[in-house]
DNA sequence: CTCCGGCCAT
DNA sequence: ATGGCCGGAG
């Protein structure tokens, strides 16, 4: 890979080879997955690891294969199915949002409209817009925050660093394959650019990374 | 900005 | 046993 490859190109190339295949994902380059499944997985993933989410996701989607089905479910059934995941207000918001979507007749496809649904904040709205609808949204979760802080050596501590981090994330977010890009950033943060002992030797962004150049990437 | 939740890694 | 975590909401 040439030294002048762009960050999105490097990252997407890496994602094409290393994307994890997960039940709620569409493989790189293939048509976007069902927004309902993306949303459900994102809400579950906000609070639990991939391994813990898998069985819950499978049970939810087999029992309620569509938003409409979830919207029609009695609250008690959803709460019972959620038991063990914690953060029960998220399950309540899940049902509320499903009913709002059913009422609308379709899943909102813009970041702003998604943001208006209960339980969808800046992060989840951007993630669904990008991953399920292919829109260019700047998706920043805690993993991405760390990756971007390192890439640009933003050493101001959180929460002050949020605005510069977001601005920097904006500059590297591509118009094409925005969903894959977002998922790639999150995969990178989860598997390579980890909080402690980042694996820079395996990182597709090692060359342009300012933190790595500084010699102490874990400081960010 | 602060608070909150509840599982899970330490 | 304890607190870290990480989003959303007020």
Image: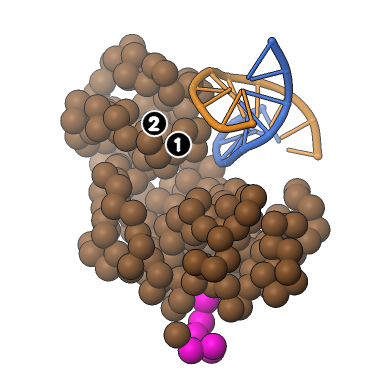
Chain colours: A brown, B orange, C blue
- Residue under label 2, please give it: A52
Whole-percent x, y for residue A170 in the image? 58, 68
Residue depicted at x 42% and y 57%: A183
Tell me the chief SS of the magenta region: loop
Specify start and end residues of the magenta stretch as a single range: A2-8
Residue pictured at 73% horizontal, 69% vertical: A215
- Quarter of the rendering containing residue A180: bottom left
- Residue underneath mark 1: A49
Residue A162: x and y in percent read 70, 55
Up/down of A126 relative to A92, above or below: below
For the residues beneath circles 2 and 1, the answer to whether they share a chain is yes
Q: Is residue A41 magenta?
A: no
In the rendered image, is residue A76 in sight? yes
Task: Determine the chain carrying the residue at label 2.
Answer: A
Query: Mark 2–mark 1 contact, CB under 8 Å?
Result: yes
Q: Indicate the position of residue A26 as horizontal and vertical percent values.
A: 26, 56
From the viewer's perspective, tell me whether residue A29 is left or right of residue A84: left
């Amino acid at each position: 890979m040439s030294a002048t490859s762009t960050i999105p190109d490097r990252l997407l190339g890496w994602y094409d080879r290393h994307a994890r295949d997960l039940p709620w994902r569409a493989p790189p380059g293939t048509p976007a997955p069902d927004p309902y499944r993306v949303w459900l997985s994102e809400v579950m993933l906000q609070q639990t690891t991939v391994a813990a989410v898998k069985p819950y996701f499978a049970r939810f989607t087999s029992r309620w294969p569509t938003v409409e089905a979830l919207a029609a479910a009695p609250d008690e059934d959803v709460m019972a199915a959620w038991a063990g995941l914690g953060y029960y207000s998220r399950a309540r918001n899940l049902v509320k949002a499903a009913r709002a979507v059913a009422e609308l007749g379709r899943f909102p496809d813009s970041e702003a409209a998604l943001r208006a649904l209960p339980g969808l904040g800046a992060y989840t709205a951007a993630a669904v817009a990008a991953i399920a609808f292919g829109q260019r949204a700047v998706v920043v979760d805690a993993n991405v925050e760390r990756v971007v802080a390192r890439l640009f050596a933003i050493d101001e501590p959180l929460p002050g660093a949020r605005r510069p981090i977001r601005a920097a994330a904006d500059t590297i977010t591509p118009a094409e394959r925005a969903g894959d890009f977002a998922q790639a950033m999150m995969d990178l943060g989860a598997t390579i650019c980890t909080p402690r002992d980042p694996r820079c030797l395996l990182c597709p962004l090692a060359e342009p990374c300012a933190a790595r150049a500084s010699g102490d990437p874990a400081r960010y």
